[in-house]
C-alpha cells in the first residue's frame, strides 16, 4: 500500500550499515532467529536454496541500459515501475500479470508518462500464472509487485534466473513462504544480486538520522515501543457471475490470507519493521487479540478489521502494536519509543531527552523515499556494491505473521515456532479452476478465525 511521501535527504552510510548488518548476519536477531531454527526448517531452507540455479548475475556498466520487467501491474506495481523509469539508463521491456486488463491499463499509463522508456510490444506482454517466468527472462532488473502470496515463488524464480530484484513488502504470507524467501535471499547474496524491498522508511532521511541518534544512545536503553497503522481500510471489487472462486479472490486479494496475510501483514509491517529497526532485533514472542467488529460483510473475506499485539524482545523490551481498518475511528500511522533518558516520536523525527530541548530533524532538501529506494538499488547495481534487503524483509514479515497467528489463535506465539510452522496457505495448484483453501459457505460467508479454537502453527 502506498502512503504519504515524507520529506528528507539520504544518508547512505547509515542505510548501508543497517542493510549490511541485516543481510550479513550482524543484525543480532537474524543471528538468533536463524540459529534457533529447528533442523527441519534449516533443512527446508537449505534444500530450497540448493534448488536455485547457480547462473551468474550480469552487472551493467554505467553507460548500459538496464532492462526492467514488471511482474504485477496493479497500482503499486505501476508506481514502482514508474520510479524505476525515473532512474537514468533504465527501460521497461516486459510486463506480466494474471489479468490482461490490469496489464493493458498499466502499460497505457506508463507509456503516457515515460514515452520511449517503455518498450513492451505484444510479444513481451505475458498473462497468466506462469507469465512471470517469461518476463523475468528478458530483464536485468525485476520488479515484483503482485499480491504478497506470490512473492516467494516469484523471488525464487528471479534469483534462479540471476536477476536483480525490487520486491514490494510484505515478502510472504505464511512461514513456508518466509523460509523460501530466506533461502532465496542467501542465494542472491552468493550470486552478488542486488535486492531491494519496499520498506521505504530505510531510505527516508528523517528516519535514518533519527535511528542513528537512537542507536547512538540519545534516549538511553529503549524499553517500550508503540507502533500503529490505524486507518479506514481499502477497496472492494464486487463479485461477477462469470468469475471462478480463485479469480474473485485474486481480484479482492486484500481480504484473503493466502494472498495478503491480513492487513497486519500487508500494511502494519511498515511500523513493525521500524520497531525492529529501533531495537536492532526481532521479537521473540507475541500475544494479541483482534476480530471483526465493523467490517463483517461477506465482501470482506476472511480477515479481521482490528489487531492489537504485545511483542517481547529478548532483552525484555515490549512493543505495543495496533492496526485497524474502521472508518470514522482515530487514525494514526506512526512509531514511538521510550528509553531510560527520554523518548522519541520516531515517525515525526523528534527526540526528547529529559532536561533538554527537543531535537527535530529538518532539511531543506525534499526526497521522496519511494523514489530514493529505487535510486539506491540502481546505484548499487551500477557500482556493484553490496545491497540485499531480503533477509530483513523476510524477518520483518515474519514479525507481522506472528502477530496474526497470535490474534487468530489467542495463544502466545514464539518466533521459532512461528518460523517452523508447516501451515501453508497457498493453493496446491495455480489455474483459473483451482480451489483456494478458504471457501465461502452457502450464504457466501468465509470462515473466520476464532481465538481459542483456531490453530495457526
Image (cartoon, rainbow, N blue to C red):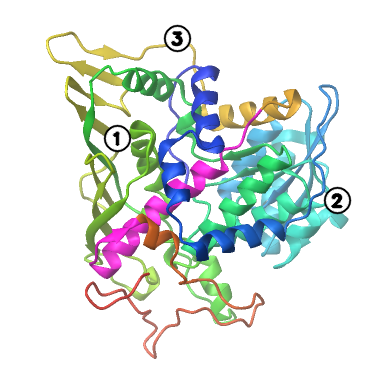
Q: Which residue is drawn at 64% across and 51% down?
A: 184
Contact between labelled residues 3 and 1, with CB atoms less than 8 Å apart? no
Query: Mark 3: few, some, or many residues within 10 Å (few <14, many ≥20)?
Result: few
Whole-Å distance between the Cαs marked 2 and 3? 42 Å
Residue 55 rendering spot, x and y as whole percentages: 82, 48
Magenta-drawn stretch contains 399: yes
Q: Is residue 190 left or right of residue 25?
A: right
Indicate which disc, 1 or 3, sits on the residue closer to the N terminus.
Answer: 1
Q: Is residue 71 left or right of residue 259?
A: right
- Give the residues drawn in magenta, as a range: 386-414
Residue 69 rendering spot, x and y as whole percentages: 75, 46
Question: Where 257 falls versus 164 (above or below)?
Answer: below
Q: Specify the quadrant of the image occupied by residue 215.
A: top left
Q: Residue at x 39, y 19 (%)?
A: 212
Indicate which disc, 2 or 3, sits on the residue closer to the N terminus.
Answer: 2
Query: Which image quarter holds the C terminus?
Result: bottom left
Query: Mark 1: few, some, or many residues within 10 Å (few <14, many ≥20)?
Result: many
Whole-Å distance between the Cαs marked 1 and 2? 44 Å
Q: Is residue 377 left or right of residue 9?
A: right
Q: Can residue 242 be seen in this view?
A: yes
Whole-Å distance between the Cαs marked 1 and 3? 23 Å
Q: Which residue is drawn at 66% across and 40% down?
A: 189
Mark number, residue 335: 1
For label 3, the residue is 364
Q: Which residue is drawn at 72% across and 61% down?
A: 51
Secondary structure of the residue carrying tag 2 is loop
Magenta-drawn stretch contains 279: no
For label 2, the residue is 121
Q: Which of 145 and 102 is in front in this view?
A: 145
Amino acid at each position: 500500500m502506498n502512503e504519504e511521501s515524507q520529506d528528507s535527504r539520504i544518508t547512505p552510510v547509515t542505510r548501508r550499515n543497517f542493510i549490511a548488518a541485516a543481510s550479513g548476519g550482524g543484525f543480532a536477531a537474524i543471528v538468533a532467529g536463524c540459529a534457533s531454527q529447528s533442523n527441519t526448517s534449516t533443512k527446508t531452507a537449505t534444500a530450497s536454496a540448493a534448488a536455485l540455479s547457480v547462473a551468474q548475475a550480469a552487472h551493467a556498466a554505467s553507460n548500459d541500459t538496464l532492462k526492467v520487467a514488471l511482474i504485477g501491474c496493479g497500482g503499486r506495481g505501476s508506481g514502482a515501475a514508474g520510479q524505476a523509469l525515473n532512474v537514468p539508463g533504465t527501460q521497461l521491456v516486459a510486463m506480466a500479470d494474471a489479468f490482461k486488463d490490469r496489464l493493458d491499463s498499466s502499460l497505457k499509463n506508463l507509456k503516457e508518462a515515460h514515452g520511449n522508456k517503455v518498450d513492451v510490444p505484444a510479444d513481451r506482454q505475458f498473462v497468466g500464472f506462469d507469465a512471470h517466468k517469461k518476463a523475468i527472462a528478458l530483464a536485468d532488473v525485476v520488479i515484483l509487485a503482485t499480491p504478497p502470496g506470490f512473492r516467494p515463488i516469484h523471488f525464487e524464480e528471479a534469483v534462479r534466473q540471476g536477476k536483480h530484484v525490487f520486491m514490494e513488502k510484505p515478502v510472504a504470507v505464511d512461514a513456508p513462504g518466509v523460509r523460501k524467501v530466506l533461502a532465496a535471499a542467501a542465494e542472491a547474496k552468493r550470486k552478488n544480486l542486488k535486492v531491494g524491498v519496499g520498506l521505504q522508511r530505510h531510505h527516508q532521511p528523517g528516519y535514518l538520522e533519527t535511528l542513528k541518534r537512537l542507536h547512538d544512545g540519545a534516549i538511553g536503553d529503549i524499553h517500550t515501543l508503540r507502533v500503529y497503522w490505524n486507518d479506514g481500510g481499502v477497496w472492494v471489487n464486487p463479485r461477477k457471475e462469470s468469475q471462478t472462486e480463485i479469480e474473485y479472490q485474486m481480484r479482492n486479494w486484500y481480504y484473503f490470507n493466502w494472498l495478503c496475510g491480513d492487513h497486519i501483514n500487508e500494511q502494519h509491517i511498515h511500523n513493525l519493521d521500524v520497531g525492529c529497526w529501533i531495537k536492532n532485533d526481532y521479537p521473540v514472542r507475541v500475544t494479541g487479540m483482534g476480530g471483526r467488529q465493523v467490517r463483517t460483510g461477506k465482501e470482506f473475506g476472511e480477515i479481521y478489521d482490528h489487531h492489537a499485539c504485545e511483542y517481547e524482545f529478548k532483552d525484555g523490551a515490549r512493543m505495543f502494536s495496533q492496526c485497524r481498518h474502521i472508518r470514522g475511528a482515530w487514525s494514526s500511522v506512526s512509531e514511538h519509543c521510550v528509553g531510560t533518558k527520554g523518548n522519541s516520536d520516531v515517525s515525526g523525527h523528534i527526540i526528547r531527552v529529559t532536561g533538554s530541548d527537543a531535537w527535530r530533524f529538518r532539511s531543506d532538501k525534499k526526497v521522496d523515499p519511494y523514489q530514493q529506494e529505487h535510486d539506491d538499488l540502481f546505484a548499487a547495481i551500477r557500482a556493484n556494491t553490496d545491497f540485499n534487503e531480503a533477509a530483513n524483509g523476510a524477518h520483518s514479515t515474519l514479525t507481522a505473521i506472528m502477530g496474526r497467528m497470535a490474534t487468530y489463535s489467542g495463544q502466545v506465539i514464539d518466533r521459532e515456532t512461528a518460523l517452523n510452522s508447516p501451515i501453508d496457505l497457498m493453493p496446491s495448484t495455480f489455474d483459473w479452476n483451482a480451489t483456494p483453501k478458504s471457501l465461502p459457505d452457502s450464504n457466501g460467508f468465509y470462515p473466520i478465525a476464532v481465538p481459542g479454537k483456531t490453530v495457526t502453527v
